[in-house]
Amino acid sequence: MDIKKFLVKNKSIVICLVVSLFLGFVSAVDAMPEAEYNTLLGQKEQLESQVVELDNQLAVVNNEVTVLQEKKAELDRLAKEEAERIAKEEAERAAREEAERLAKEEAEREAARLAQEEADRLAAQQQQNNNIASGSGNGQAATETPVGQMVWLSATGEKYHSINNCGRMNPNNARQVSLESIKGQYQACIKCY
């Protein structure tokens, strides 16, 4: 096997050597016995056939190298596509998470805004109830009061009352509304009606 490697690596040297030997033998044919000449000629033909065989093996190896290089290029292309796909999925996931985070923050801001509006509305209503209960006001209470019978509603109850402190009702949280506006939604309290 070492000879084959040597011959493949030094093919041009071997060919030159063979040709030189052949020329040397041809020139020395007259002085050389025929049997020795035939032996050397046989060795030359054997070396030439080995060179042809090595050329064929080299061509096969070159073909295998070409096939392997093509496979490597294909695998590199597939690996690059997979890396790009993974990077794209990661970017999409990050974008989804960011959108969800922003939506959650917006929902929290909206909930806080609605809670503040409700607190402001309740505070204004409480102030109005306090003004009505204390008899104070700047003259607008008489014009805003609807015509008809007025009743009291607790903050959480299901009944309407004729007074703002009936039973366990908190007068600070009671609100006054017209009876016509709540008919059918609330029942009359049996204690004060």
Image (cartoon, rainbow, N blue to C red):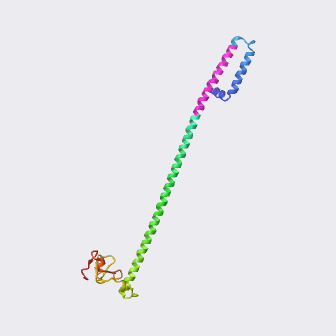
Left or right: residue 158 compared with residue 78: left
Please report the residue visible at 54 percent of the width from the left and 45 percent of the height from the top: 79
The reply to whether the magenta stretch includes residue 171 is no
Please report the residue visible at 53 percent of the width from the left and 46 percent of the height from the top: 81
Helix, strand or loop: magenta stretch: helix
The reply to whether the magenta stretch includes residue 52 is yes
Residue nearer the viewer, 36 or 124: 124
Q: Position of residue 135 (x, y in %)?
A: 36, 88
Q: Which residues are the magenta region?
A: 37-64
Please report the residue visible at 45 percent of the width from the left and 67 percent of the height from the top: 108
The part of the image, by quadrant, that contains residue 176 is bottom left
Left or right: residue 53 compared with residue 101: right
Q: What number of labels is visible?
A: 0
Question: Relative to 102, does residue 69 appear above or below in the rendering?
Answer: above
Q: Quadrant of the C terminus?
A: bottom left
Q: Position of residue 23 (x, y in %)?
A: 73, 18
